[in-house]
Image (cartoon, rainbow, N blue to C red):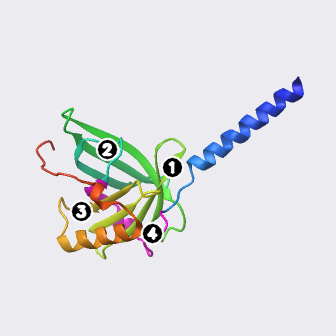
């Protein structure tokens, strides 16, 4: 009986470690390549979400911004904010990001839920760090960001073409409104 109990404990511990390692595994979609060199100090600050592939945590949000700042422990504070136009209220989510690989590569992992991380891959960015194309772990997550509430058409078309090459369904993008009425 004691032997069976020890086996169960060992199996549960192993399953827990496997789940934790799977939950914290971060990937990049096949065909996507993270920006290198990547300068985190230039990436910090406020970004406006121009477009996204929608998912439950951003559903019904407009005026979405992401603000990145350096934390004392070296990680990056992620402050996501958006206005839920169906409930007429602001939603905010604070998380943290760390480099998934080398610190000169735009491969980050981000967490809003304890030890669980997801891929956050900067796959296109201009020299001035004004516009960025972000890929998640897979083809379900993608964002187009800008330092302003709009993006030039030539940048938009370039990022959409790159996303389609990788396999993203750009027809499914939600284009975020920035009307400023709620700010």
- Residue 45 in percent (x, y) is at 30, 59
Pointer 1 residue: 117
Residue at left 82%, top 27%?
Answer: 5
Q: Which residues are magenta?
A: 29-52
Decide if residue 179 is in sight here: yes
Pointer 3 residue: 147
Q: CA distance from mark 2 to mark 3?
A: 19 Å
Q: Give SS at disc 1.
A: strand
Q: CA distance from mark 1 to mark 2?
A: 17 Å
Relative side of 183 to 135, left or right: left
Up-down relation of residue 128 to residue 148 (above or below) = below
Mark nearest the camera among 2 and 3 is: 2
Pointer 4 residue: 32
Mark nearest the camera among 1 and 2 is: 2
* Sequence order check, earlier mark of 2 and 3: 2
Residue at left 67%, top 45%?
Answer: 18
Check whether the beta carbons of the residues at disc 2 and disc 3 lie within 8 A of each other: no
Q: Give SS at disc 2.
A: loop
Does the magenta run of residues contain 31?
yes
Pointer 2 residue: 58
Mark 4 Cα-neighbour bin, 10 Å: few <14, some 14–19, many ≥20 = some
Residue at left 31%, top 40%?
Answer: 92
Q: Nearer the viewer, residue 179 or 66?
A: 179
Residue at left 48%, top 52%?
Answer: 118
Q: Give SS at disc 3.
A: loop
- Residue 39 in percent (x, y) is at 40, 70
Is the N terminus in the top left, top right, bottom left or bottom right quadrant? top right
Mark 3 Cα-neighbour bin, 10 Å: few <14, some 14–19, many ≥20 = some
* Sequence order check, earlier mark of 4 and 3: 4
Mark nearest the camera among 4 and 1 is: 4
Mark nearest the camera among 4 and 3 is: 4
Q: Give SS at disc 4.
A: loop
């Amino acid at each position: 009986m004691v032997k069976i109990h020890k086996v169960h404990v060992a199996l549960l511990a192993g399953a827990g470690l496997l789940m934790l390692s799977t939950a914290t595994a971060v990937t990049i979609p096949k065909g996507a390549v993270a920006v290198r060199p990547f300068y985190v100090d230039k990436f910090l600050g406020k970004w406006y979400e121009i477009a996204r592939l929608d998912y439950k945590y951003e559903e019904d949000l407009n005026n979405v911004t992401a603000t990145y700042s350096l934390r004392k422990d070296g990680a990056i504070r992620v402050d996501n904010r958006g206005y839920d136009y169906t409930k007429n209220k602001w939603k905010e989510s604070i998380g943290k990001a760390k480099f998934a690989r080398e610190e000169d590569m735009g491969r980050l992992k981000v967490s809003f839920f304890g030890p669980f991380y997801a891929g956050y891959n900067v796959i296109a960015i201009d020299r001035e760090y004004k516009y960025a194309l972000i890929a998640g772990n897979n083809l379900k997550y993608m964002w187009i960001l800008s330092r302003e509430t709009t993006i030039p058409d030539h940048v938009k078309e370039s990022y959409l073409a790159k996303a389609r090459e990788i396999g993203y369904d750009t027809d499914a993008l939600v284009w975020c409104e920035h009307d400023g009425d709620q700010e």
